[in-house]
Amino acid sequence: MAVTFYDVNSPAGLKKLDDYLLTRSYITSYQASKDDITVYGALSKAPSAEYVNVSRWYNHIDALLRISGVSEEGCGVTVEGSAPITEEAIATPPIGDTKAAAAEDDDDDDVDLFGEETEEEKKAAEERAAAVKKSAKKKDSGKSSVLLDVKPWDDETDMKKLEEAVRSVEMEGLFWGASKLVAVGYGIKKLQIMLSIVDDLVSVDDLIEERLTVEPINEYVQSCDIVAFNKICK
C-alpha cells in the first residue's frame, strides 16, 4: 500500500514524518528501498536533531547511499508539496549551496555563472554519478530462510536471557522470526529460532562464529547448528 507524505520540508511535514518513523526503521519495508530514496531526495537538507526519528533514518540512508546504494523496489510512496526529485538529488545527500556562497564572497563583476567547475565540484559530480550507476546496476539479492538450533551450556542457563541475547544481534539484511524451546533431555532445552537473510549481506556461518558464539552472548550460548536452510523464491 502506497504511503503519502506532505511538504516534508515544513515543520508540520517533518513532525508527521518523525511520528511515522517512531516505530519504523524504513519508509515501507523491513529494509531500505527506493521508497526511502524518494523521501530522502525530497528533503532539501539534513533534518534538525529536534526530529530524532527522521534524523536517525536520514543518517542511515545517507550512509547506505555512500557505501552500497539501494535496489529494493519498495511498496510505493508519494511526496507532495516538494520540488521534483531528480536522479542526482537521490544519489547523494544535498551538498549545500556552495555556488551561492561563493557568489556572495565575490564582487558582482567577478561572478561567472558559466565558469569552469572547481576541483571540489568535479569530485562531487563524479561521486554522484558513481552512486547512481552503482545503485542502478545492483540487482535484487536473493533471500533465504534459516532455522537455527541454539544450545545453552546446561539446565541452569536462563533461556529467556539467551533468546534476548540472540535477538540483540542486528545486521543489515538479518530478520529474526518465530522461536520455541525444545526439550533435549536431563532438563535441558534448546532454542529453535527462524530467521530470514539477504544472501549478499549476511553469511550464516559468520553470524554464528562472529556474533552468536562470542562474548557477551557466549555467556548463555554454547553452540549453534543450522537445522534448515532454504532459498526464498521470488
Image (cartoon, rainbow, N blue to C red):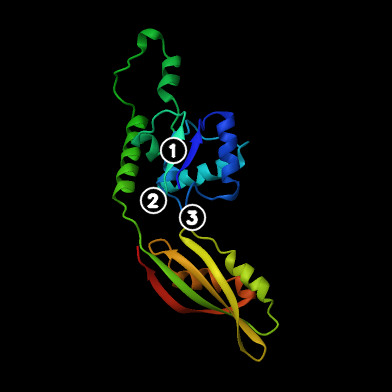
Residue 78 numbered mark, or none: 1
Q: Are marks 3 and 1 in contact (CB under 8 Å)?
A: no
Q: Are marks 1 and 2 in contact (CB under 8 Å)?
A: no
The local secondary structure at tag 2 comes to loop
- C-alpha span from label 1 to label 2: 24 Å
* Depth order, front residue of 67/188: 188
Q: Is residue 77 visible?
A: yes
Instruction: Name the residue that disc number 3 marks.
Output: 30
Q: Are marks 2 and 3 in contact (CB under 8 Å)?
A: no
Left or right of 49 in this view: 1: left
Residue at 41% across / 16% down in the picture? 103
**What amino acid does circle 1 point to?**
Thr
Residue at 39% across / 30% down in the picture? 84
Instruction: Name the residue that disc number 2 marks.
Output: 68
The image shows residue 203 at horizontal and vertical percentages of 43, 68
Left or right of 61 in this view: 186: right
Q: Earlier in the sequence, mark 2 or mark 3?
A: 3
> Does 218 appear above or below 96?
below
> Does 206 appear above or below 28?
below
Marks 1, 2: nearer the viewer: 1
**What amino acid does circle 3 point to?**
Tyr
